[in-house]
Image (cartoon, rainbow, N blue to C red):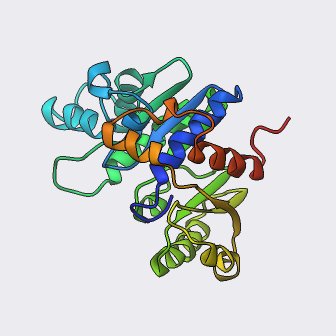
Amino acid sequence: MGRGGTGKTSFVAIMAKYLIGVGETPILLVDVDPDQNLAEMVGVDLEHEGIRTIAELLTETFIKKGGTMQGIAPAERIETTVLERGLYEGDAFDLVAVGTKWIEGCYCLPDAALKGALLSLTKNYRYVLIDSPAGLEHLNRKITTRVDDIFDVMGPSHKSFEHVKRAYRIIQEVGIAFENFYIVGGCQFTETLERTVEEETCQQYLGRIAFDPLVLESVIAGRSLLDLPLGSPACRSVVQLMERAGYGRK
């Protein structure tokens, strides 16, 4: 998670590339950001694949098809629909996206539907990577009640430091269980900030994602970050970050 523009989605995509490369599969990618960029960054065209987002499935199920008829409880009905029509299944990873909500109201219902689907899905995967939206509301809605590791990708602003403190407090107060809370510096993070981040946030700092022109070119062109060369600056830096967090070690 992190503030907007810090590189969260790119980080998740390259994390997935790393885990696939070391054989830590199967992986489930979960895109909770309404801007839904994660699929494109891992080379998946959901519309072309015939996969619907959760927001689209909710609209079709509860508005276009007459609400909660058919004698099935609403929660059970949408969870089944998500598993049947909202899950992209690939060779190395699967993906589910909350998607953009086109009708009035908050994201409570899409997030609740995702939470229910994850209860059924997560047991089938070695790792589940969740790309969170820029705000903090998703934490209050507890899309998941337990995670192993939280990565907060920080930008170089004072607001990013405050975001970490607020996020950590919300996570504790709403009761999301976790093992580790890690700080990751985005590509614009400076060496000066690196020297103070642990003291100011009271959280473990893993390091910085290296600026990589290839990532920028790929994002602009809509190319998959899974196709980045392993020797690219971003990939090398993410490998180091993941190893520091204990991933890939036998």
Front residue of 227/158: it is 227
Quick check: 167 above or below 126? below
Residue at image coords 42%, 34%:
96
Q: Is residue 37 visible?
A: no
In x, y percent, where is residue 199?
70, 81
Front residue of 98/183: it is 183
Front residue of 139/15: it is 15
In x, y percent, where is residue 39?
39, 35
Q: Is residue 96 visible?
A: yes
Residue at image coords 48%, 81%:
158
Query: Which image quadrant is residue 153 in?
Result: bottom right
Please state if 72 lies on the left or on the right of 41 as rendered. left
In x, y percent, where is residue 68?
24, 35
In x, y percent, where is residue 245?
74, 52
Farthest residue in the top direction? Answer: 91
Residue at image coords 50%, 27%:
94
Number of numbered labels in the structure image: 0
Quick check: 208 above or below 241? below
Query: Which image quadrant is residue 184 in?
Result: bottom right
Please state if 51 lies on the left or on the right of 225 as rendered. left
Q: For the C terminus, which image quadrant?
A: top right
Residue at image coords 49%, 68%:
155
Quick check: 219 above or below 108? above
